Image: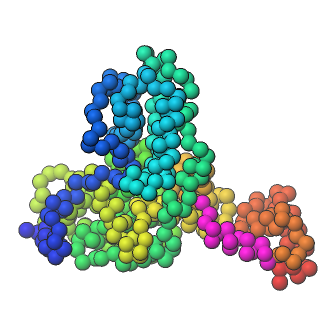
Amino acid sequence: MNETDWDKISACINTNTNLVSLDEGDEPDPVGLVKSKVSENDGIYFENDRIIHQWLQFAGRYEAKTISAKLAFIREFEAFFHGKSFGKIKTEDVSAFRDSLKMSVESDRDNKRSVSTVRHCASHLKAFFDWLIDQSGYQNLNRSLPGHFILPKKFDLKGHSDEEKPTPTDKEAVAMVERMPTDTIKARRDRAMIAVAFLGALRADTTTSLRVKHIHVPKRKIIQDGRVSRTKNSKSWKTNFFPLPSIFEKVVEDWLEEISALGFRGDDALFPTEQDLHPHLSLRSAGDIAVMNSTHAVSEAFNCASELVGKRFTPHSAKYYIGALGLKHCKTLQQAAAWSANMAHTDISTTQRYYQKMTLNDIDEVFEAFEQTSGSDAQPDDMLLMLRYHEHGLVKGTAEFERARELLSEHQKKGTFT
């Protein structure tokens, strides 16, 4: 028995935990994401199997996880109407289902769902019916059916609220790494996974599918290779380490040294399963150490780390944190564009819309600065222009830049800001 196995068994003995929990390959169903609301007492329906089979062939262009999510929502819609043929669906049917989705957000029972889940459900079903109304045998369906899945605008706004996107503060992000246990090799692996997720603003799937060769600490880079790692849309990208406290980089560096001493090579998993975390790898049979096939381990690592700071964060919280950090660091449009690109976003608007929502505290700080000029004769537009100048948001040589300089000079002479 190696050290890793003994650590695992000892932990189970000390906590009265079933040994079945040791298998990291057994990932529990993601709660709330694509959870079916069909109870065990509901029937099994076959009426729509043929058209669903056709849709599955069409959906082959998506990743397997995406197909599973879409299919779960389609089957949920089918069960809602007790297996009614999709060819007989009316606009009032879709409206009734949409209303049930809206009510599930406000529910105080077990069927309560997050805004994010409801939005995904409505979006996937709209896309399915967009496809369905053009299929042979379904072209007599009302062409307006897909539009009835569209949710009220307030759902879009709530979906981007702070409640839906928990983001750690600077202190909490550091504390999550500092307070993680390090007494076992698994614990040190989990700690390193969290550090890497923050350093590269990585998705959970990308983090767990990295290989040793993908991390270059001296160059401060992470290679996201879409050919061998589970990156979004199989995109390849070179990510620079984001500017974080030194503990994040130190944890990753220490982890690389530890697994190198165990015999890990470039093509081996950076974060392997517990079963592969043992010494004497030099005696192993031919072949590389495989990456984990699920995100369960990194999700559990974030659960553990966030509990230590009294919060609940997901792996994606690291990406939200880095997006928010960009608001503090980036003073010019060029810097903001580079920050966004380093997050592997092809468009800066993606970063701004989904990852840089200003909190109420951020807004208060800006307006406190405005209040300092409340006794002056400065107009609101002029105040905003001067604020943009101080934040390096104006391009030198432009009319706005020159106007801001003139305003600042005038108010300095008047002593407005002293």
Q: Is residue 330 left or right of residue 111?
A: right
Position of 302 relative to 371 (above/below) = above
- Colour logic: rainbow
The picture places residue 43, in percent across and down from the top left corner, at 28, 34
The picture places residue 142, in percent across and down from the top left corner, at 53, 22
Q: Is residue 376 left or right of residue 80?
A: right
Position of 45 relative to 240 (above/below) = above
Q: What residue appears at the point 22 percent right and 58 percent down from the top-left corner?
A: 24
The picture places residue 275, in percent across and down from the top left corner, at 17, 61
Q: Is residue 136 left or right of residue 408?
A: left
Query: In front here: 245 or 116?
Result: 116
The part of the chain drawn in magenta is 357-372
Q: Quadrant of the C terminus?
A: bottom right
Asked whether 255 falls inside the magenta stretch, the response is: no
Query: In front here: 127 or 399?
Result: 127
Q: What residue appears at the point 88 percent right and 70 percent down from the top-left corner?
A: 378
Asked whether 368 falls inside the magenta stretch, the response is: yes
The picture places residue 50, in percent across and down from the top left corner, at 32, 22
Q: Quadrant of the N terminus?
A: bottom left
Position of 264 relative to 258 (above/below) = above
